[in-house]
Amino acid sequence: MSTYLPPAEPYPVVLAHGAGGGVEANFGPVRETLAAGGRRVVGFDLPGTGAAPRAARPLDLDALADDLVATADAAGVERFAVAGYSLGTAVAVRAATRHPGRVTALVLTAPFAFADHALRQTAHLWRELAAGGRPDLVARLLVPLAFGAGTLEPMTPEDVEAAVRFTAASVPPGTPEHADLVTRADVRADLPRLTVPALVISTTGDRLVSPALHRAFAAAIPGARLTELDTGHVPFAENPEAWGKLMAEFLDDLRGQGSAPRPAVGSAPAGARGVGGQPVVDLAAGPAHR
């Protein structure tokens, strides 16, 4: 079977979510926007999220990058863009430097090349609370940091408590390992090596990952485009329409330049998994698994 698709076909995209999140949690609200026009959208869940088994040892960024590419292989996608969010931006960047023939573009939202003091200390506490079985306290830590002031402050106390309860109920089992990786991930040496088109989206009201980290991240990537989005750290909750539009338009612009990659024809086989055991979540083929 031929694997060629003409340049007018949409860029396929693999999604890399943030710590304590998931493909559906972080990208579900923009799934239809990204899949518009027939674009293949493949989700990569970190260990301990969705149906992916929890890791038995600390997470390794190189291994996760390889697993992301293996997930694309299992989905039948040869070359693809990666949309990374928060911790997922480090996974996306490492995948691009370890597999330069596979990753053809990057969309990076709320990124950090390494954790500054504030983020590292928050992640240490996040890890310990999650490991101690206190998702309620994880939620009380993260809600005031994740939402921008423009979203959080107009809420009633009842709204805030509802957000805390929802967040606590959605903390995935792999959160301690995710938060631990936040304290250790460092892609500063990778950024100048990137040669693919890159869009960096800075969430300007972000109180978890400072916009200063976003700007430094973008400045280190040759030719990167930096744009701003007026939300806190959770654009999928605060303004998914604007976030999805920024990502989709960037990918569509690349298609218009005639540089689209050539994905294999067809959807992922039922039960397909990457080498790390992550089930393939082909969002364009139907509802994501969670």
Image: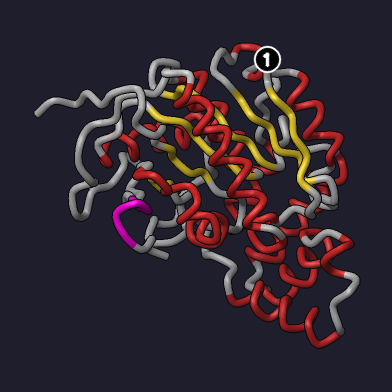
Q: Return the x and y of residue 216 as percentages of the image width and height.
A: 81, 26
Q: Given the current orientation, which residue lies at the most extreme bottom position?
A: 158
Q: Residue at x 39, y 23 (%)?
A: 260
Q: Residues within 10 Å of mark 1 (few under 14, many from 20)?
A: some
How many numbered discs sit on the rendered protein?
1
Q: Position of 163 compared to 117: left or right?
A: left
Q: Residue at x 63, y 41 (%)?
A: 246
Q: Nearer the viewer, residue 284 or 269?
A: 284
Q: Return the x and y of residue 214 as percentages of the image width and height.
A: 78, 34
On screen, residue 236 above or below 166 = above
Q: Residue at x 36, y 27 (%)?
A: 8
Which corner quadrant of the image does residue 68 belong to?
top left
Q: Which residue is mark 1?
A: 223
Which corner quadrant of the image does residue 232 belong to?
bottom right
Which corner quadrant of the image does residue 249 belong to?
top right
Q: Return the x and y of residue 251 as percentages of the image width and height.
A: 51, 33
On screen, residue 285 above or below 7 = below
On screen, residue 286 above or below 119 = below
Q: Position of 169 compared to 228: left or right?
A: left
The quadrant in which the C terminus is found is bottom left
| Magenta segment includes 282 | yes
Q: What colouring method underlies this structural image?
A: secondary structure
| Magenta segment includes 226 | no
Q: Given the current orientation, which residue lies at the most extreme left position?
A: 1
Q: Which residues are magenta?
A: 281-286
Q: Position of 227 compared to 259: left or right?
A: right
Residue type indicated by callout 1 = Gly
The quadrant in which the N terminus is found is top left
Helix, strand or loop under label 1:
loop
Q: Nearer the viewer, residue 131 or 89?
A: 89
Q: Return the x and y of residue 115 as percentages of the image width and height.
A: 77, 38
